[in-house]
Amino acid sequence: MALKLHRCRNIWFKPSGHPCWRVQRELDAKGIEYEIVKEPWFGKRERVQQMTGQRKLPFIEFEDGTVLREESKDLAARIRRGELRPQAASNGQGVSQPT
């Protein structure tokens, strides 16, 4: 699978304002194939911090290991516009290279 959606473990929780569901719903609507990576609900989220520089979810990991982390409403809008790619964030913000 080329794309991974890192999200909270509440995959059953689907209110429209939930950040993780907001992004997952847009991926589904666009027919984009992805793998769900369930991250901890709370705590330090050390792996998330290592990958993105912060502890917030959700984020997208591309096949080359590049990650894209933005606020869920911005990430969802990017997906709707068809601009989901590793080089998507302007000036490199929100994108980090593999470690």
Image: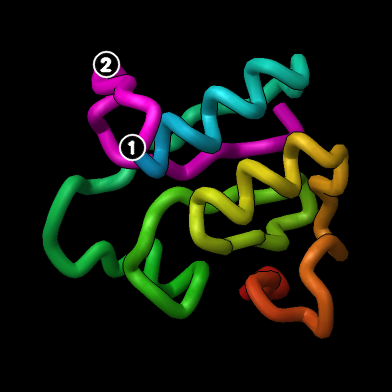
Q: Position of residue 58 (x, y in %)?
A: 45, 49
Circle 2 residues within 10 Å: few <14, some 14–19, many ≥20? few
Which segment is the magenta one?
Answer: 1-17
Which residue reaches farthest bottom? 91
Q: Position of residue 96 (x, y in %)?
A: 67, 74
The mark tally for this picture is 2
Q: Is residue 60 above or below residue 49?
A: above
Q: Residue at x 13, y 62 (%)?
A: 43
Q: Position of residue 93 (x, y in %)?
A: 69, 79
Q: Residue at the spot x=18%, y=69% of the render?
A: 44
- Whether residue 77 appears in magenta in the rendering, the answer is no
Q: Quadrant of the N terminus?
A: top right
Q: The C terminus is located in which quarter?
A: bottom right
Magenta-drawn stretch, dominant element (helix, strand or loop): loop
Residue 18's label in the rendered image is 1
The residue type indicated by label 1 comes to His
**Which color scheme is applied?**
rainbow
x 83%, y 61%: residue = 88
Helix, strand or loop at label 1? It is loop
What residue is drawn where x is 81% and y is 58%? 86
- Left or right: 82, with 97 as reference point: right
Sequence order check, earlier mark of 2 and 1: 2
Neighbourhood count class around disc 1 (C-alpha, 10 Å): few under 14, some 14–19, many 20 upward: few
Residue 12's label in the rendered image is 2
Q: Is residue 71 above or below residue 1?
A: below
Along the viewing direction, whichever of 4 and 56 lies nearer the viewer: 56
- Determine whether, in the image, residue 59 is placed left or right of residue 96: left
What kind of residue is marked 2? Answer: Trp
Question: Regarding mark 2 in the picture, which secondary structure is present there?
Answer: loop
